[in-house]
Image (cartoon, rainbow, N blue to C red):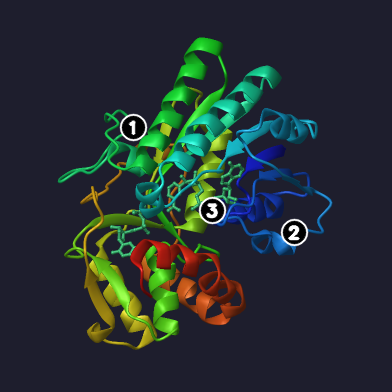
Amino acid sequence: MKLLVTGGCGFIGSNFVKMILAMAPANQVVNLDKLTYAGNPENLAEVAGDPRYTFVRGDICDASAVEEAMAHRPDAIVNFAAETHVDRSIDSPGEFIETDVRGTYTLLEAARRHGLRFLQISTDEVYGSIEEGSFTEESPLAPASPYSASKAAGDLLVLSYVKTFGVEALIARSSNNFGLHQYPEKLIPLFITNLLEGRKIPVYGDGLNVRDWIYVRDNCAGLETVLRQGKAGEAYNLGGGNERNNLEITRALLALAGKGEECVEYVSDRPGHDRRYSLDCAKARALGWDPAHSLEEALQETYQWYVEHRDWWQPIKSGEFKRYYLAHYGDL
Ligand code: NAD
Ligand code: TYD
């Protein structure tokens, strides 16, 4: 199997590329990545010299860059490339519309031209917030942020290409991922690295928003299952089955760091902040997938990885992240 993976230098994409290459000697990956602030070639340093891995630097909105990647003749496309941070989408929505909508369209056109299977990596955030019960794949899309709205638009384009052009495309909607190589703007790596730096950790609002956390390796296993066995025109929910509110995650991280509640700073809430995400994953489980890691073990492993990889996150936190954070909050 030769895959064109887009956004492979990001958090989930890099974990996925390494998993695919480790799965079978015949597997090959072409990685098309623009290297935005979130793309880091170091995430794939361990496979950079593997002859089965090819890197193409380019933008998924640029049809000629996509064609350059296509020249490597992949069998399928897996689209991870996206702008992904809700807070940044509130500050500057334009890049989200560009990459998450136009980029998806550009890749779908390539899949159509070349007759390729296409897996769109989407998110539970497209369903919006749910007070009770869980979303199935049939639930209506009701996104609340420019990020989730642009991902929902991408999903709708995918489904239109199945119906109108017969493209063999499908969608995976994952819940909140965590694990190694996650950019320290997201809740878990931000809090871990702040605690390691002796900083406070900013909890939005009352801290009672609920997310369903999935360890990135479990998500990648689910994505591979959906890619291989999923049906064109269908979406598949991939949740970890670990619903926790933000204060519960905060307390678990404080315990790992051996620190107390005095490190918590309650800050003003995110505008449009979704209260709760929850996924019914029976459809993906029927394909034979199930998350294998417990939240507690995976959090411990993740915490330890950040303890041991300051060389990975410190340059980010004193560089691009610091500039973003100062512009956003005006303070550190
Ligand atoms: P990330 O922000 O860590 O990485 C995004 C990657 O995409 C980077 O390597 C970046 O350089 C690349 N990229 C961005 N714009 C590009 C463009 N125009 N052309 C080419 N490359 C571009 O993202 P992530 O957290 O790994 O998320 C990957 C995918 O999974 C996204 O589609 C996201 O919506 C989805 N997702 C993420 C989560 C999560 O918790 N992180 C949950 C559900 C779904
Ligand atoms: P995040 O990691 O940004 O993922 P998403 O918004 O896509 O779910 O945030 C996870 C939860 O943590 C969300 O409810 C917002 C909250 N949060 C904080 O309380 N403080 C923070 O500094 C961040 C980044 C997030």
Distance from mark 3 CB to nearest ligand 1 atom below 8 Å:
yes
Residue occupying the point 26% across, 78% down: 264
Quarter of the figure that contains the C terminus: bottom left
Residue type indicated by callout 1: Glu
Q: Quadrant of residue 110?
A: top right
Residue 255 vs residue 36, the one in the foreground? 36
Depth check: give the residue in front, 103 or 328.
328
Q: How far separated are the C-alphas under marks 1 and 3? A: 22 Å
The residue sitting at 47% across, 66% down in the picture is 184
Secondary element type, mark 2: helix
Q: Earlier in the sequence, mark 1 or mark 3?
A: 3
Of labels 3 and 2, earlier in sequence is 3
| Mark 1: secondary structure | loop
Residue 119 in percent (x, y) is at 55, 34
Q: Give residue 35's position: percent from left, percent from top.
A: 64, 52
Tag shown at residue 137? 1
Badge 2 is on which residue?
47
Q: Relative to 136, is 233 above or below?
A: above
Q: Nearer the viewer, mark 2 or mark 1?
A: 2
| 66 with respect to 190 (left or right) | right
Amino acid carrying label 2: it is: Val
Does residue 285 appear in the picture of this structure? no
Contact, CB < 8 Å: mark 1 with mark 3? Answer: no
